[in-house]
Image (cartoon, rainbow, N blue to C red):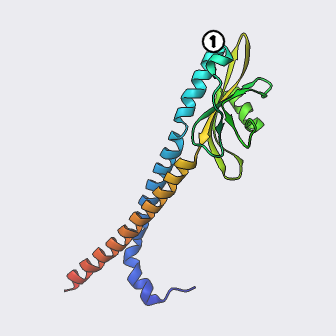
Amino acid sequence: MKIPPALARRALPFAPLFAVVTVLALTTYVALQQSLRISANDPQIAVAEDAAAALAAGQPLSQVVPPARAVRAEASVAPFVVVYGEDRQPRTTTGTLAGATPVPPKGVFDYAKEHGEDRVTWAPRDGVRLAAVVVHYGAESGSGYVLAARSLREVEDRIENLGRLVALGWLAAVVCGAVASLAVRRFAAA
């Protein structure tokens, strides 16, 4: 579709304003979205690292992850913990997914073993997205992995609201900028 030359001439003075406002809006959205998503890992980092350190120090599994009412990952935003042996088989859990203990992909275990931990956004099934932290631990009594995870449902709702607010701010800035530019042009022409 070709833009009529008269419209292009009228819109041209607004192009720099449009570009600047768009870049600022996108930068704001990305920075805040990343801050929200990354901070969703914070409780899991503490839980996984503390549990792994306790297990590495030889504390019994029952003291590190006491039996609790199981968190249903598909329905709750509460964090849960799963301890896996070095064989990557669950040893204990405080969370379930569709009635079973959730097990992340093999690559998550591989990365955690090589680097000490892995922080991932994990979608184990449709409609369920988890912020998960997996920490590898080693001790004389054995080694394994601690996974701490929680649903991203609330964080993703906040990100969606943020997107709407940034889009409204962008639209308001473009409209106000265009009106101000037109007013200045008319005033200067008079």
Query: Is 87 placed left or right of 135 in the picture?
Result: right
Toward the front, the furthest residue is: 69
Tell me if residue 71 comes above or below residue 128 in the rendering: above
Q: Residue 117, how many percent across, how many down?
A: 64, 29
CA neighbours of label 1 inside 10 A, class few (<14), some (14 to 19), many (20+): some
Tell me if residue 110 comes above or below residue 152 in the rendering: above
Q: Which residue is mark 1?
A: 57
Query: Is 100 placed left or right of 45 in the picture?
Result: right
Report the front residue among 119 and 161: 161
Query: Is 94 placed left or right of 16 in the picture?
Result: right
Q: Residue at x 73, y 32 (%)?
A: 109
Q: Residue at x 29, y 80 (%)?
A: 182
Q: Residue 145, how many percent across, how many down?
A: 70, 26
Give the quarter of the figure containing the C terminus: bottom left
Q: Label 1 amino acid?
A: Ala
Q: Residue at x 59, y 24 (%)?
A: 49
